[in-house]
Amino acid sequence: MKNLPFDLNAAKAWVDKHPTPFYVYDEKGIADCVRRVYDAFSWNPGFCEYFAVKATPTPAILRLLASLGCGADCASVPELVMAGCSGMTGDKLVFSSNETSDAEYREAVAAGAVINFDDITQIDRIIEATGSIPKKVCCRYNPGKFGGTSDIMGHLYDSKFGMTGEQLFDALGRLKEEGAESFGIHAMLASCSLENSYYPKLAEELFAVALEIKDRLGICLDFIDMSGGIGIPYRPEENAVDIKAIGEAVHEVYDRVLKANGLEPAIYTEMGRYITGPYGYLLTSVIGKKHIYKEYIGVDATAACLMRPAIYGSYHHITVLGKENAEPAGVYDVVGSLCENNDKFAVDRELPEVEYGDILAIHDAGAHGHSMGYTYNGKLRPAEYMLRENGELKLIRRAQTMDDYFAVLDCDNEFAEARKKL
Ligand SMILES: *Cc1c(COP(=O)(O)O)cnc(C)c1O
């Protein structure tokens, strides 16, 4: 069983006013999570969480995070603009891109973002694009192999991200020659890790490199960015990580490896999923029940609203509102209306007796949920709401309309005219 910050009565009142499907974010849940992260790293005076904007690119959420001290990790110009307009400016922005155009570099440098170089060749590119090297720079490291945790991003030899160790030293040396003044390193070697040991092991790896950078180049790093990759328990039987224990374990490595050798860089993180994932819900209504070779429950949301189950086979827990404690009545596939057979929120899932009109809450949709949405089959993007601590439901992104969908087409208004006749 997984808890919800609302019940059937609240959801019914919302659904009476706003058609499903829509997303609901728990403001208090997100804020408390950020406070836990800052508490866990409070031993490090320069600590900053740069929220990975791609997880939940919604200004109301970015403004909330900015008010709690967070910066933003961006990978595109629209993300930089949105974060900048939400109160994250200057070096509260990290630009962690790969395969970056000159135009993107110009915008990121103009925004004052910390440039996180994915490759040594990008140093020449940015000089060509902007005429100089920004003062505060970072290099992304790919160690090729990384032992210890089971959640690493496949084989790092296959990962397109980051530089080899030797390239990292060359790049930092070159950046220093070109006039950069403040340096950091970055690595993201896991995805959705539920192991408390991931950040501490990454810290061992990165902090050792920081010492070598000091010895070989005379550069004392100002910051070390451990990026994202901290997981959340999508399944009810999984346990959340202990962020306080993680912070303490990184602290121990920091004092032993860095502080003992005269280095005291700021620690940065770029968590996305951990910050918003558990605090977002996709609400959808049951609009069909079908019995053929299997039992199907049809809903008004589709993989175009939440594609993780379709593309990764990810588990997302489903609560039938008002039936939280009911016994399972059978095993169902919960499916949307796309003309694709992977459009399933759950496969062979035990659920209580479900009726037409029941409201389902799909859990852990707060990160990489709405943001990965698309409009296949002419499915319009759903609205997003913030559930305030006082119980108020506030619209933070309206649903896409048919006019929005047609707006980019060369159609001389004929679709708008056709719609009027419907
Ligand atoms: C995706 C990404 C993150 C966030 O990852 P999560 O798993 O959501 O924490 C952070 N940094 C970079 C560079 C990323 O690409």
Image (cartoon, helix red, strand yellow):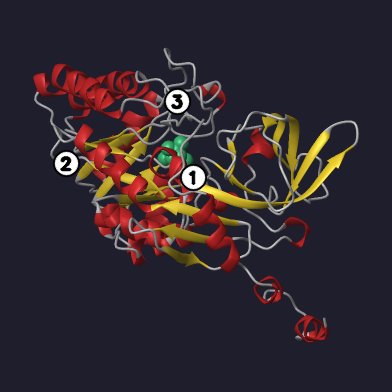
Q: Residue at x 64, y 52 (%)?
A: 284
C-alpha gap between disc 2 and disc 3: 25 Å
Q: Where is residue 49 shown, x and y percent of the image?
A: 29, 43
Identity of the amino acid at label 2?
A: Gly
Q: Residue at x 16, y 41 (%)?
A: 46
The circle drawn on residue 193 is: 3
Quarter of the picture holding the C terminus? bottom right
Q: Indicate left or right for 105 with 409 as reference.
A: left
> How many marks on residues?
3
Nearer to us in this view, 362 or 174: 362
Q: Where is residue 405 shown, x and y percent of the image?
A: 69, 70
Identity of the amino acid at label 3?
A: Ser
Q: Residue at x 51, y 40 (%)?
A: 364
C-alpha gap between disc 1 and disc 3: 15 Å
**Are dots 1 and 3 in contact, CB under 8 Å?**
no
Label 2: which secondary element: loop
Picture quadrant where residue 222 is located: top left
Comes first in the chain, label 1 or label 3: 3
